[in-house]
Amino acid sequence: MAAPARFAMSVDVEDYFQVWAFSGAVARARWDEFPLRAEDNTRRLLDLFDAKGAKATFFTLGWVAERAPRLMRDIAARGHEVASHGYDHKKVFDQSPDEFRADLVKTKKILEDASGARIRGFRAAGFSIDRRTPWAHEILRETGHDYSSSSHPIAHDHYGDPNAPRDLYEVSGVIEAPVATAEVFGRRVSCAGGGWFRLAPYALSRMLIERASATIEGPAIFYLHPWEIDPGQPRIKAAPLKSRLRHYVNLGVMERKLAQLLGAFPWTRVDAALGLS
């Protein structure tokens, strides 16, 4: 039997104007007014993953998949996993159970029709499955999802629960696979990617990811977004300053740092790392 995979790579396929931090400045009704850059940026990631021999899971918005169906089929054809990120980036705790169920069913059909692959995984917008959504995993099971990677077990002003498990756990027959955290001097810190990875020195990020993989049950799951390798993206000037600082910090170095990280560890898909593929 093969040893369990220790490192899982994931991409949240959403565009620069769809991030939660900009939701107050860019209404969903205006999304079609913005140029779609997620497809080209995702293809750049696919090429980079191929060059480094890495596999990944692409948690994709149904809204994006509707506009880039060929991209979904190409992701699957190149050996990666297509998974659900919901239809249009609504947080789970802002939906009723019936709304969440309808969103899952709608998105799953869009992704399966576009990719030709079964959709088994889900990641909530803003890691928004938490104590406010005790019904979420049961609905995921009902709608044919085998796992979720919707927990970021840290303290953060937009998401997270510092008391949530760092390890894999199961609820209602669905595996919950939190993204990577590490313990430093008794304090839990994120090493899962995003702005932390862009801002922190590469050596520190690598050390923390390795520590996470050695101290949690299950893989160390890393995540990024296609817009993070796109320093030329249009600026959302109406967004709050704090949100803009977080979003735009070190976009110009992300691709280089990511290439280093891909070469440092053997990265695989989330479903494969969980023994589901």
Image (tube, rainbow, N blue to C red):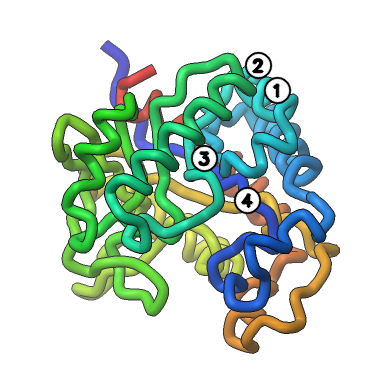
- Specify the quadrant that holds the N terminus: top left
Q: Quadrant of residue 137?
A: top left
Q: Position of residue 218 (x, y in %)?
A: 26, 38
Q: Secondary structure at mark 1?
A: helix
Q: Which residue is mark 4?
A: 14
Q: Which residue is mark 3?
A: 59
Q: Which residue is mark 1?
A: 74
Q: Secondary structure at mark 4?
A: loop
Q: Quadrant of residue 208?
A: bottom left
Find out whether the residues at labels 1 and 4 contact each other: C-beta distance under 8 Å.
no
Asked if residue 23 lies left or right of residue 205, the reply is: right
Look at 41% across and 59% down and name the residue there: 91
Residue 219 seen in the figure: yes
Along the viewing direction, whichever of 229 and 76 lies nearer the viewer: 76
Q: Could you give the CA–CA distance between mark 4 and mark 2, rounded to whole angstroms?
A: 20 Å
Look at 72% across and 83% down and name the residue there: 238
Q: Amino acid at mark 2?
A: Ala
Which circle marks residue 77 in the picture?
A: 2
Asked if residue 247 lies left or right of residue 36, the reply is: left
Q: Position of residue 133 (x, y in %)?
A: 23, 56
Callout in the foreground (1, 4): 4
Along the viewing direction, whichever of 113 and 168 lies nearer the viewer: 113
- Which of the two labelled residues, at mark 3 and mark 1, occupies the earlier sequence position? 3
- Which of the two labelled residues, at mark 3 and mark 4, occupies the earlier sequence position? 4
Q: Amino acid at mark 3?
A: Phe
